[in-house]
Image (cartoon, helix red, strand yellow):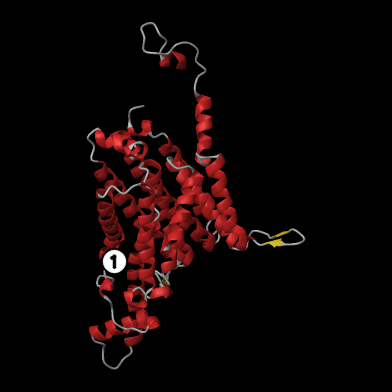
Amino acid sequence: MSNSFIGRNPSILWFLLALSVFTIGVTLLSEATGTGLISTSFLKTLGKTLCLCLVAIAMDVVWGYCGILSLGHFAFFGIGGYAIGMWLMYARTEGIVTGSLSGSALPPTPQEVTDAIGTQIFGVVGSSEFPALWAFSHSLPLQLLAVVAVPGLLALVFGWLAFRSRVTGVYLSILTQAMTLALSLYFFQNDTGLRGNNGLSGLQNIPGLEAVPQATISLWFFWASAVALALGYILFAWVVSGKLGSVIRAIRDNEARVRFLGYHVESYKLFVFTLTAMVAGIAGALYYPQAGIINPAEIAPIASIYLAVWVAIGGRGRLYGAVIGAALVSLLSSWFTGGSAPPINLGFYVVKWTEWWLVLLGLSFVAVTLFFPKGIGGIFDYFERKRLPDRQGDYGPDKGALRQQEGVE
């Protein structure tokens, strides 16, 4: 059992158990089941948090296990959101336009319908024509494929160019941040076809489900987010275990030595970088229909920096640490910035958490880096050491020496 996949990754069962209990509990307390103890808005917050946990796991694998500090993974997250958002806007607008034109004396031609849809979507930026980016926006299967393919292709091309040039360390981090900044600035332009600063809105309205209450739709997305997080955890637990995981961690610790041993380091790094980008795209595709809107500010470089902070606080190099960090910071952020946290009156100054939350987050990151380098997840290491037997004597390989299993017994 100790050599099996589960034996090498005992945290999987505990994580799946905790996630199942959490999902069932939230379901029973949601408005969709009639109890209403958890509001629909907070249910969406929990669903979005699960998506952020998934992208945090992806970030942990690429940084905590492979040693690549990517400051651009939230860009892949945003691209996934844009890909599914394009279909949501097109399909929803098509239904509205078709309904409004159905009362015309003459049935509208397909071109008239297309022009009307274009006017509705792009009128806000002074256009009515569909750009090339929207060529497949009418097809849900193709847009779902784009959710995975576009981030994966972008990561593959970028990673191949960077890794083959053997760019590492802080220089690679700067390159990923530059890529994110370039994408953000590109999306901000009105002539890119993504509605510029307006972004894509109304994503919470799922086409064909207009009669279904938002409470029910939110619960469905919450379930989908929980399933995606569970599958993502299992996938990445497999990636970081066994020989593949050993090579990835060795690259993190001493890339030159791994290359000297005959491993094609660039291929391993490219595999991890591309796979995590694809999973980040899936997380974004589940996140933004629950958020209801996406704009270029969502993929600005600061978002990817936040992602690294979450992983560092939770404990990089531990999948469950990334989940803890993302969930904790995300929920605290919603509480502090949403006005729920009461202000503190110091007499000479009133601390309003909506203004001071980022300062608190920054101080927390500095404190964790200086005093708790293993993050919150490092607490589990303490209990792990506590379970080890208090053995005495020589446990070396020499003849007559005690063996570790004797100490366990």
Q: Residue at x 46, y 55 (%)?
A: 305
Depth order, front residue of 272/367: 367
Q: Residue at x 66, y 62 (%)?
A: 352
Q: Is residue 80 above or below residue 313?
A: below
x%, y% of residue 331?
54, 54
Side of 393 where 5 appears, left or right: left
- Quadrant containing the N terminus is top left
Quarter-of-image position of residue 320: top left
x%, y% of residue 144?
29, 62
Side of 402 where 193 appears, left or right: left
Q: Residue at x 31, y 34 (%)?
A: 242
Side of 242 where 289 appears, left or right: right
x%, y% of residue 292?
45, 68
Does residue 291 show up? yes
Going by the picture, which residue comes out furthest to the top? 400
Quarter-of-image position of residue 367: top right
x%, y% of residue 103?
33, 89
Q: Residues within 10 Å of mark 1 (few under 14, many from 20)?
A: some
